[in-house]
Amino acid sequence: MGCVSTSAHVGGSQVLGIIPTTIAEGNITRKIIGEELRVPTMQDRIWKMLDNSDAFVTLPGGIGSLKKIFKSPLGLN
């Protein structure tokens, strides 16, 4: 995600990083490029992503990527 957000930012796109507070405070991630929005839970993160996005692209990843696609508030359960 870091390479994609950095490239988008360098290319002039608006980048919003939405991160749960526990992850941000635990310093698990690197510094977010662009604007950072902290939310209480992962579920809140998904809702904020839906509120602030026009489209989604899912890149190959682990089981967490599949969970975000199929267990989202989009009703794709």
Image (tube, rainbow, N blue to C red):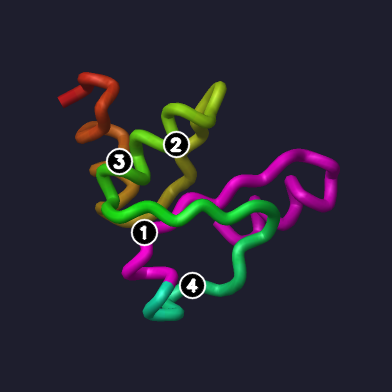
Q: Which residue is identified by label 2?
A: 49
Q: Is residue 75 above or below residue 22?
A: above
Task: Tell me how far mark 1 sits from mark 4, CA to CA.
Answer: 11 Å
What SS does tag 4 mark?
Answer: loop
Query: Residue tagged by mark 1?
Result: 20
Residue at x-position 48% and y-position 72%:
29
Q: Residues within 10 Å of mark 4 (few under 14, many from 20)?
A: few
What distance separates the C-alpha of mark 1 from that of mark 3? Answer: 15 Å
- 15 lies left or right of 59: right
**Which of the marked residues, 4 or 2, is nearer the chain's N terminus?**
4
63 above or below 75? Answer: below
Quadrant position of the C terminus in the picture: top left
Amino acid type of disc 1? Pro
7 and 63: which is toward the camera = 7
- Badge 3 is on which residue? 68
Q: Which residue type carries mark 2?
A: Met
The nearer-to-camera label among 2 and 3 is: 2
Q: Which stretch did the figure color magenta?
A: 1-24
Q: Callout 2: helix, strand or loop?
A: helix
Q: Where residue 53 sits: x, y (%)?
A: 53, 28
Marks 1 and 2: CB-CB under 8 Å?
no
Q: Which of marks 1 and 2 is nearer the N terminus?
A: 1
Q: Where is residue 66 in the image (x, y as percent from the top left)?
A: 28, 42
Picture residue at 57% right of the left edge, 55% below the top: 36
